[in-house]
Image: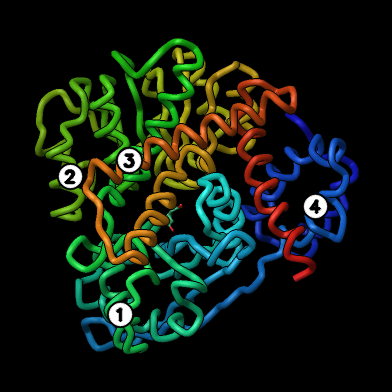
Amino acid sequence: MPRIDEKLLPIFEDVLRRNAGESEFHQAVEEVLESLGCVISKHPEYADNALIERICEPERQIIFRVPWVDDKGQVRINRGFRVQFNSALGPYKGGLRFHPSVNVGIIKFLGFEQTFKNALTGMPIGGGKGGSDFNPRGRSDGEIMRFCQSFMTELYRHLGEYTDVPAGDIGVGGREIGFLFGQYKRLTNRYEAGVLTGKGLNYGGSRARTEATGYGAVYFVDQMMRTRGTSFEGKRAVVSGSGNVAIYTIEKIHEFGGKAIACSDSSGYIVDENGIDLELLKEVKFNRRGRVRDYAALRGNGVHHSEKGSIWAVPCEVAMPSATQNELDGTDAQTLIKNGLIAVGEGANMPSTPDAIRQFQEANILFGPAKAANAGGVATSALEMQQNASRDSWTFEETERRLATIMRRIHDSCAETADKYGAPGNYVLGANITGFVRVADAMRSLGVV
Ligand code: GLU
């Protein structure tokens, strides 16, 4: 595993000092800086004018109070965030996460990653991320609506189709985007469809946006497997999580002839050796807002539900971590490798710890990092913005066709960059360098801003 080049070390030390305690942000920056040593020795101009220091510093960070009233009439307070990380390539773009673990460090790591991911898509979008420590679990529709309205009452002044375009992430799906868009429209008295993505199909959303992150991750892994003359056909896959990303990852794996046998949530994981019954999983998760243990109870015999232990102990050839950051550690990686793993595609953001990534690379496992593998979601958000701007709407097939092309291009550019820097097959290096160079080139043209 490369270490940070000594020329870049002072930059990293400054990031640690100026962002004390934000361990996820440190982790995300460290991984990118580790990839950049070979770039600045070949092209020292990228280190001029404090360019790398500027890339590590968000352009703007907004933190605000979100007061709301619960169903019992009690006043509640949460904290809202929007980190507008980098706008060299386009308006800030990235999701909102509603989860009790959210803090400024988590939003900064996500915004930092988003900047490079968005650059990798080749679309004109900058990087940003936001959210709140609000916990939607167990909240009524009315409470969710009042929370979203209060959140937007502050955030709207910082948004705009040319300024900052949020979307969903953990805890924010179609229902929340609807409430957020309704309040934005009311406050601004403008029908500005392109200010949010992930909208419903009945008011300006794009077909295939819901499916895009999961589908895109499977396209990416498929491309990686092709480089070794193999495919999903007949392969066992484990997909952690059971949200939007996991569900459509499973759907596409099945379409590609593989078999997804396990998924999870905070209630544990399930193993269904016959392959996950997606209709049932969608019913449990989307309609009932239930847990995977409910899936096990409804599906009956042959499904194993475990509250303890790691989903990564389930033997498989393809692992697609699609739950959350740092959910797959070095020990999990060792178990997966021992059990015959051939490929990993990260559907979540930064789900593998640095130790896990090192183990995968040492064992020559195909490893598709989040920035590249899960970029299909935000790429399709950019397609939604395109449709909104031209007041058009495309068919599912047309939108998915474009998504597939984008994923192939992302794969190929990461692979080419890795080759160019003497590390064939290293998609981590390929993704970090390709994303960095695109953002850095634009920043150099724009001067010191
Ligand atoms: N939250 C998603 C991501 O991590 C999607 C962001 C978007 O569509 O703007 O990339």
User: Which amino acid lies under the numbered mark 2 shown in the image of this protein?
Assistant: Lys
**Mark sitting earlier along the chain (1/2):** 1
Please tell me which residue lies in front, 302 or 282: 282
x 30%, y 60%: residue: 173
x 80%, y 52%: residue: 12
Using a 10 Å C-alpha cutoff, classify the residue at mark 4 as few (fewer than 14 neighbours), some (14 to 19) or many (20 or more): many
Q: Nearer the viewer, mark 3 or mark 1?
A: 1
Residue ID for mark 1: 191
Q: Is residue 439 above or below residue 190?
A: above
Q: Quadrant of ligand 1?
A: bottom left
Mark 2: secondary structure:
helix
Q: Is residue 134 above or below residue 286?
A: below
Residue ID for mark 3: 246
Seen in the image, is 395 located left or right of residue 233? left
Residue ID for mark 2: 282
Distance between mark 4 and mark 1 Cα atoms: 43 Å
User: Which amino acid lies under the numbered mark 1 shown in the image of this protein?
Assistant: Tyr
**Mark sitting earlier along the chain (3/1):** 1
Residue ID for mark 4: 12
Distance between mark 3 and mark 2 Cα atoms: 11 Å
Please tell me which residue lies in front, 414 or 374: 414
Q: Position of residue 435 (x, y in %)?
A: 63, 45
Q: Position of residue 292 (x, y in %)?
A: 23, 42
**Mark sitting earlier along the chain (4/1):** 4
**Mark sitting earlier along the chain (4/3):** 4
